[in-house]
Amino acid sequence: MPIETNFDIEFTARLALREKQVQQNYRPIIAVHKWFARRPGTLFRSLILAEFIDKPVEQTYYNSHNLEGLIIADPFMGGGTPLIEANRLGCNVIGTDINPMATWIVQEEIAEIDLTAYMQTADYLLAHLSNEIGELYKTRCPITGRKNADVKYFLWVKTKVCTACHQSFDLFPGYVLARDVRHPTYVLICPACGDLNEVADLKHPGFCTCGKNLTAKGPVQRSQCPCPHCGHINKATSHDNGPPSHRLFAIEYYNSDIKGQSGRLFKKPDADDLARVEKARDEWFSLSPSYLPEDDIPAGDETNRLHRWGYKLFNQLFNPRQLLALETVAGFIDQIQDHRLRRAFATNFSDLLRYQNLLCRYDTMALKSLDIFSVHGFPVGYIQVESNFLGIRKDNGLPVGSGGWVNIIEKYTKAKHYCTAPFEVYFKGKKKRTVLIDGEWIGVHPPQKSQTHARVLDLRCGSATTLNLPKHSLDAVFTDPPYYGMVQYGELMHFCYVWLRKLMGHDFPGLDLKTTLHRDELTGNDTAERGIVHFAEGLAEVYSRMAVALKPSAPLVFTYHHNRQEAYLAVAMAILDAGLTCSASLPCPAEMSGSIHIHGTGSSIVDTVFVCRNRGITPCSKPFKDATDLAQIIHHELVELVAAGMRPTAGDIRCIAFGHLTRMTIWNLHSDWNTSQPTSRKLELIQVMMDEVSTIKDVEAALELLNQTRLALNPNLFVVPNT
Ligand SMILES: C[S@@+](CC[C@H](N)C(=O)[O-])C[C@H]1O[C@@H](n2cnc3c(N)ncnc32)[C@H](O)[C@@H]1O
């Protein structure tokens, strides 16, 4: 039982925590294209090594390995984390995903590319954009008078026509453009004249040069806004006549002539800036675009918000300058003759879209653009940001700002370089060291030796509920299934897919499906009427197929977290139906605590890693009979997580507890499990058994008691937070 004995919670948690702070520094490959909620690569490397190298993982982690000949599958590959780790360790891999974007992305991540040719084409692309549309991203610096300073961000505010007096007005929820974190002062927009004012004290903001009082608070409150012309209270979000309109109100720019400037450069747009907006609009409307997708935004749990704001088509989420720029670059990519390079730039194009749309928000603290997927939804703000399409380089070549081609090319180049020279990061004291893991590589052939050592890379697009693999062919399944309704993959990725498909053509391999939405997606979704039964049955079908394909005693290992019991009932049913038992449930941090989609949601950052094996041969490890027993197990794990640098929250502890309760419930039910019962009955039986083992409330109480007893003995101990 290698994972069960070789895996080290503290060691892996430390790696995973660090990785999730800036995942691209640990696994640059993820920058090839956005995927949602990627688990840490370091976690899957640890798991694979723990399973196949019979030593404690800490002793093997930084060595080079070649697990040639092993076959690993991931039925829910998404952005490919487990598969890429397995491929890098020398395994043959089989992956599937129902979402065509996932298959496209993993293929693109692993496929070799001639980086010199890529970078040369990237230079041509940037030169082409500079010629065609570069002028549209320039501005006059009011400080030095330089006429061709680079715009980093254009800032737009939503506007509304008053339903009473029919005059237009701005929908400012607040007037703070920048906070005094990365900028020496606050920057406040004047409500009367729109001038930008540097303000030291937000409580006493003073007056604008126009004489008007400055204030941080904007007129939009609780989705309502009084019209400044007639006082009529308007509903801010209702847009019955199409998508909302916007007004350019500020610019953040870069001027390389200004040296040693602390903070950023902001300006109110001048007449030339507004003329550029008009020029872009005129040019766009004079075109007959070839690459503009006309697809509707279908109804969905996430997309319904867009409908409420009046957006009906995906192409309405962009302003004319963005559409013109996308059309220009798409035309260039379409002309690239080399198939591999065209695919790479199309992938870049698709990833760039998340920064080049009018749903991006401006982070007034970090002073940067938050891309459309910075949360797992389509939040619509009142202030939106448009990034420089080309991107900006400083004199030393390093990029400034985010969201442009320069940034995308830089990230992609690093990602592909990492494939040929993967590394690991470790800390000696506080010093960060990067170690090249010589001999490891990601791909089908070793770098520069295209004829030798082919590793199997079998990527499929389709529902894993229909995936047929030969019996006893797999050495392991490592996966990361959907977490019930947490992320709507199909709805979200549709945003990129419509553009990619239009650019490459629907007959291009992998782009034949019309949409990324699929009724068999294993997510809860109210709009599509997919509930827990759909999720439980689908997961059970997939795990049953995997169990047949696994060699005897080979593991099915997956990460999971949710804060509702219902979601674990489905997991337990899937494992039981597959004829497996759960030999371990291990905690590991898998999200970043400050991450925007986690922050303030009460969600947990800890995943449970479920290790499942064939029922007949798996001994029961770490059994427990009640809440008091379980509290001891959880406490030991919390001590390890704390030693790794984590501060577990009540939500984390809840998820860890649910993991163990699920494991023990499976154990108690497996010998008499009848797979032919109706799903509702199975879920009911599992719930009754889980509650019999212990309720979450009892576990929390037992942990509290344990805490108090231990604290009485040693007041310096780590205290489990109150739930
Ligand atoms: C949690 S994500 C996997 C993330 C991935 N491990 C990564 O590193 O990016 C779950 C994936 O399951 C996929 N999925 C959902 N239903 C599926 C089904 N019926 N068959 C195959 N894949 C499915 C989703 O499209 C999503 O990519």
Image (cartoon, rainbow, N blue to C red):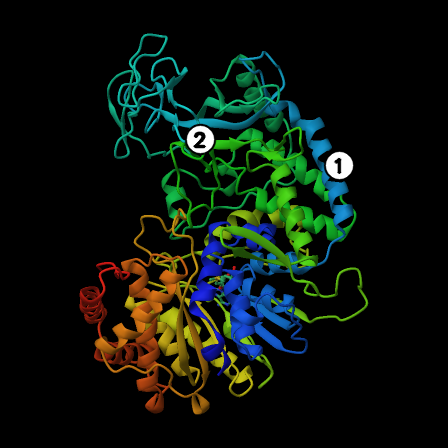
Give the quadrant of residue 52: bottom right
Viewer-closest of 232 and 96: 96
Q: Quadrant of the C terminus?
A: bottom left
Mark pair 1, 2: CA separation: 34 Å
**Residue 16, x across and y down, in percent:** 47, 60
Which corner quadrant of the image does residue 290 belong to? Answer: top right
At x 42%, y 77%, the residue is 540
Callout 1: CB less than 8 Å from ligand 1: no
The label on residue 124 is 1
Horizontal and vertical percent position of residue 331:
70, 38
Q: Mark 2 CB in 8 Å range of ligand 1?
A: no
Residue at 50%, 55% (x, y): give it.
19
Identify the amino acid type marked 2.
Arg
How many neighbours does mark 2 have within 10 angstroms: few (below 14), some (14-19), or many (20 or more)?
Answer: some
Image position of 155 (left or right of 549): left
Q: Secondary structure at mark 2?
A: loop
- The mark that comes first in sequence, 1 or 2, is 1
Q: Secondary structure at mark 1?
A: helix
Dot 2 corresponds to which residue?
182
Above or below — where is 324 with respect to 257? below
Relative to 43, say whether 29 is above or below. Answer: above
Give the side of residue 481 with respect to residue 666, left or right.
right
Q: Nearer the viewer, mark 1 or mark 2?
A: 2
